[in-house]
Amino acid sequence: MVSVDSTGVLVSDGQKVFPINVSQPPPLGGKTVDGQDAFKELANGGVTFMRVGRQAWAGDPANLDAQIAEAEKSLDAARDSGMRCWLWLGGRAIIPTPDTSGNRDVLTRIVNHFKGHPGLGAWKGIDEPNNPLDPNQFPAKDMAEAYKHIRQLDPDHPILIIHEPLSPAAQLKPYSAAGDIFGADIYPVSYPPGAHAYKPGTPANQGNRDLSLVGDLTDRIVQAAGPKKMIWMTLQIAWSGVSPTAANPGIVPRFPSLFDQRFMAYHAIVCGARGLTFFGGHVTDVMRPRDAKTGWNWTFWDLVLRPLLEELRSTAVAPILVAPNANDKITANAKDIDLVARRDGGFLYVVAVRRGGPTSQVTFSGLPKTIGGGQVLFEYTQDPLPDPHHTPAGPVQQVFRGVTVDGGSFHDWFAPHDVHVYRFQV
């Protein structure tokens, strides 16, 4: 059973989880460049979900059965590798009146077939239903009717809706009745910056084109989804806008660096994301040739995604991602700092990111005055600290960097797009 709890956290078989998804995954039966099983490599590296399914499901029984059988192979492989799937229901995840396309019947067959499969984690509904650049927009009330039908058939798996980055929150709010999990896709690493998030022809001096677009959009989706919904944001590996085409051969492909990706991931988390998807590992025309042969971007995996997931799934950071928000009113004296405070297991955590601005020392206040110090996770120093004049008497250990708390306040340096993850014992 998979569900969303009252704090917006995913619960799978009784355990709180922070899902990490890839969309789309490597080809079924695929290998890494080193010849390892592709799905097992992802699972071992921290990926817990992958998106499968299709946009167009057939209406006639014979072709639909063949499509179901094909999708089942992916769910079987995910299960065998220790992952789950979002199963995309495509254009069938809407029931208009009258239902001239037979969507209710197609949904019934798909859901009844897969609802008991151990590789199923969630259903994915209509993709970007309110996209202003797409002439085919989908009424929220008809999607809500499909939602009710799916949940009646299968109360044990949530339904996820992914929006585009253009619509204001007011236009997206009606869709809150059509799902349990909501997110949006946002790919700001491009030439020019922010090209993905703006309508063609938008002046360059209008709107935010910084990496902090991710946090702004997460805030918008939180507002649109409303309380007790889960937020699951989609971040960038690659997308069609960074691919050179015959019509525009001058496009220069860009990928997020590890520094970029870490900032975007944590900024989404600070602003309310309880899960992340990384999209575009399958975009072969911007890959190294050795990766393109495998059908997936293993260079990006090695340089960026796997190191980031190693941190997110670590025993130090993983508890933060599913912990409830704290009641502590912790503030920063710089306006370009976004933060969230959480408590779990005897620790107070503060995750802080700097959107932009100068490099400066920032003061944080509002911690319990009983706290005398804390750690900055995944930032290291030596214990004991090096002394150029003396050889240490014992072994030197690498430990998390410390901060001193005095009267409920502490200070730390932040550059643009810096992330600091603090842990304080309480």
Image (cartoon, helix red, strand yellow):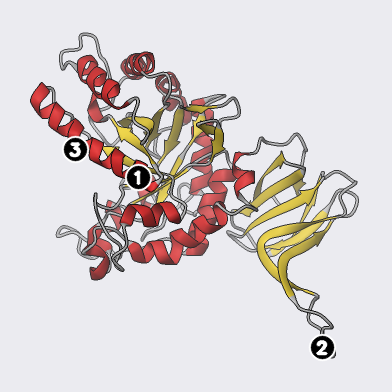
Q: Residue at x 59, y 25 (%)?
A: 6
From the image, tell me which residue sits under label 3. Answer: 70
Instruction: Answer with left or right where residue 307 lies relative to residue 340.
Output: left
Q: CA distance from mark 1 to mark 2?
A: 52 Å
Residue 5 in the image: state x and y as whole percent.
56, 26
Say what secondary structure mark 3 lies in: helix
Q: CA distance from mark 3 to mark 1?
A: 16 Å
Judging depth in this view, the residue of 328 and 38 nearest the camera is 38
Locate the C terminus and report the quarter of the image it occupies: top right
Q: Earlier in the sequence, mark 1 or mark 2?
A: 1
Circle 1 or circle 2, nearest the eye: 1
Mark 2 closeness class: few <14, some 14–19, many ≥20 residues within 10 Å:
few
Q: CA distance from mark 2 to mark 3?
A: 64 Å
Disc number at residue 246? Answer: none
For badge 1, the amino acid type reads: Asp
For badge 2, the amino acid type reads: Thr
For badge 3, the amino acid type reads: Glu
Circle count: 3
Say what secondary structure mark 2 lies in: loop
Which residue occupies the extreme bottom position in the image? 389
Q: Is residue 93 among what the camera can see?
A: no
Instruction: Answer with left or right where residue 221 lies relative to residue 94.
Output: right
From the image, tell me which residue sits under label 2. Answer: 391
Q: Residue at x 72, y 40 (%)?
A: 343
